[in-house]
Image (tube, rainbow, N blue to C red):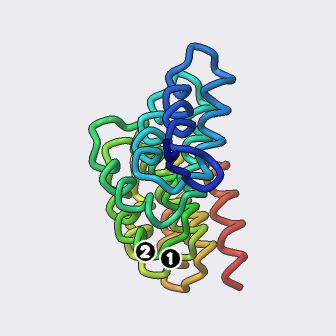
């Protein structure tokens, strides 16, 4: 009987690892999520996205890292998962997309700045800054008005990472508006120094 081989693993071994993602033992699930990052396979991508719902944050994070490692072929399924009605899945999808580093995801991360979930907005702002996505500057400037403190901080830092001078006045305005918020003012001052 001929065995299908995927890299150095058979299809059966990959299927066993996918099943292991449902194992009761958290170490088994973590190990499976880690090992599956070496397999460029649609079933693996789907299983790792499902692992974003795992009870254990380390398993969820490892699934996100493994999807980033898989790379290009994971982009479309991850973009689709940004539309899922589960904020946890959307947060980890944002994390994975950023680490893939494909510029085609920038538009989707910009859209995610308007997500209902503050965590998705925060991850998106952080990701856009790390990717130095110049096309996100206007949207990040708008995000300086976000209701969530952490999102505003992430947007401010992202604008500093990008370094586009259009951000200077809006950051100064946000700093003035943050009366009594010493922590935000510290962040804003540190970011503004990058523009000098």
Q: Nearer the viewer, residue 23 or 16?
A: 16
Outermost residue, front side: 1
Secondary structure of the residue carrying tag 2 is: helix
Instruction: Name the side, left or right, on which 13 lies relative to 107.
Output: right
Q: Residues within 10 Å of mark 1 (few under 14, many from 20)?
A: many
How far is the residue under mark 1 from the one under mark 2?
A: 6 Å
Where residue 72 sits: x, y (%)? 47, 67
Q: Nearer the viewer, residue 177 or 41?
A: 41
Where residue 27 sits: x, y (%)? 69, 23
Give the labeled residue for mark 1.
133
Instruction: Name the side, left or right, on which 34 lies relative to 67.
Output: right
Where residue 78 sits: x, y (%)? 39, 53
In this figure, what is the number of numbered marks?
2
Q: Are marks 1 and 2 in contact (CB under 8 Å)?
A: yes
Give the answer, above or below, for where 88 lies relative to 182: above
Quadrant of the image for the C terminus?
Answer: bottom right
Give the labeled residue for mark 2.
136
Give the answer, above or below, for where 183 lies relative to 161: above
Q: Is residue 75 shown to the viewer in this render?
A: yes
Question: Looking at the image, which residue is at 50% across and 76% down?
Answer: 133
Q: Is residue 148 shown to the viewer in this render?
A: no
* Residue 164 circle label: none
**Residue 112 picture quarter:** bottom left
Give the answer, above or below, for where 20 lies relative to 192: above
Q: Nearer the viewer, residue 113 or 101?
A: 101
Give the answer, above or below, for where 165 lies relative to 97: below
Q: Residues within 10 Å of mark 2 (few under 14, many from 20)?
A: many
**Residue 43 picture quarter:** top left
Question: Looking at the image, which residue is at 55% across and 53% down?
Answer: 6
Secondary structure of the residue carrying tag 1 is: loop
């Amino acid at each position: 009987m001929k065995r299908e081989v995927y890299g150095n693993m058979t299809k059966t071994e990959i299927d066993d690892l996918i099943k292991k993602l449902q194992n009761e033992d958290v170490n088994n699930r973590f190990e499976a999520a880690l090992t599956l990052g070496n397999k460029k396979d649609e079933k693996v991508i789907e299983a790792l996205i499902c692992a974003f719902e795992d009870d254990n944050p380390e398993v969820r994070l490892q699934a996100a890292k493994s999807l980033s490692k898989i790379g290009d072929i994971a982009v479309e399924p991850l973009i689709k998962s940004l539309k899922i009605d589960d904020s946890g899945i959307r947060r980890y999808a944002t994390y994975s997309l950023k680490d893939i580093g494909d510029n085609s995801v920038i538009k989707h991360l910009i859209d995610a700045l308007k997500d209902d979930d503050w965590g998705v907005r925060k991850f998106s702002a952080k990701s856009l800054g790390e990717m130095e996505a110049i096309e996100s500057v206007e949207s990040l400037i708008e995000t300086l008005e976000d209701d969530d403190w952490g999102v505003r901080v992430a947007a401010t830092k992202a604008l500093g990472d990008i370094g586009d001078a259009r951000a200077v006045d809006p950051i100064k305005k946000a700093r003035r508006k943050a009366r009594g918020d010493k922590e935000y003012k510290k962040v804003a001052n540190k970011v503004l120094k990058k523009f000098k």
